[in-house]
Amino acid sequence: MTDPAPTAAPAEGWEPNAQLQLRWGGYRSRQLAGLALVCIGGLLILPANAATVDLAFLGSAIHVAGWLILPAPGWRRVVAAGPSLIALWSTILGARTLFILAVPLLLWLIVRRRRLPSYPVVALPVLANLAGLSWFGIFDRPPLVTLCVGAVVTGAWLAVLVSRLLKEPSKRVHSGDSPVEG
C-alpha cells in the first residue's frame, strides 16, 4: 500500500525521500521504524564483548533491517547497510575507534539525500572522539560512547536544519534513483 499523497515535507521542498512513491507502507511509519531499528541495532552492537556477542548478532540483524525499510531509493539503502554494520563492529576494537561512527552518519546523509552543505557534520563524531579521549582517556569507554553517539545524533539533526534552511526543491529524480521504491 502506498501513501495516497506525500506528506507535508515535499511542499517545503527539503525532504526528497518524502516524494517517493512507496511500494508498501507509509513514508512516516517507515521512516520512524527504520530509524528506530537502525538505532536499536547499533545500541546492541556498541557495548559488545565476548559475553554479549549474541546480543550483538541480534543487533546486527535489527540494524540491517532498519536500513532496508527506510523510505529511500533501494540502492542507497542496500549500499548503506553493510558499511554501517562494519563500522559499528569496528568500534569494538576500543575507545580510539569510536571516530568510525562518522561512517553511519555519512551513510545516513546519503540515504536521506541531504544536500552537500550538510556533510561537514560528519566531522562531529571524529571531533567528539578526539575530545573524549583527552577528557576521559582510553579506558573510560561508556562516556566516550555516549559522547560520540550524541555527536552522531546532533550531526543528523544539524543536517536536517541545513536542508530546511536551503529549502531547495528536489523534484528531479537523482540519476539512478527510481521514482517508485520498495
Image (cartoon, helix red, strand yellow):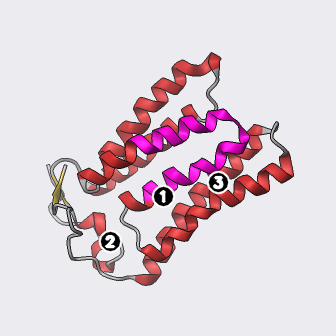
Q: Secondary structure at mark 3?
A: helix
**CA neighbours of label 1 inside 10 A, class few (<14), some (14 to 19), many (20+):** many
- The residue segment tinted magenta is 82-108
- At horizontal 66% and vertical 34% (from top left) the residue drawn is 93
Relative placement, left or right, of 51 versus 177 is right
**Residue 120 visible in the shown view:** yes
> Do the numbered discs 1 and 2 sit on residues whose CB atoms are within 8 Å?
no
Q: CA distance from mark 1 to mark 2?
A: 22 Å
Determine whether 123 is above or below 14 in the image. above
- At horizontal 60% and vertical 36% (from top left) the residue drawn is 46
**Residue 33 visible in the shown view:** no
Which of labels 3 and 2 is toward the front?
Answer: 3
Q: Which residue is mark 1?
A: 106
Q: Secondary structure at mark 2?
A: helix
Which mark identifies residue 9? 2
Determine whether 55 is above or below 1 in the image. above
Relative placement, left or right, of 37 versus 55 is left
Q: Is residue 104 magenta?
A: yes
Front residue (pair 112, 76): 76
**CA neighbours of label 3 inside 10 A, class few (<14), some (14 to 19), many (20+):** some
Front residue (pair 122, 11): 122
**Residue type, numbered disc 1:** Leu
Horizontal and vertical percent for residue 108? 44, 56
Which mark identifies residue 56? none
> Do the numbered discs 1 and 3 sit on residues whose CB atoms are within 8 Å?
no
Which of labels 1 and 2 is toward the front?
Answer: 1
**Residue type, numbered disc 2:** Ala
Q: Which residue is mark 3?
A: 150
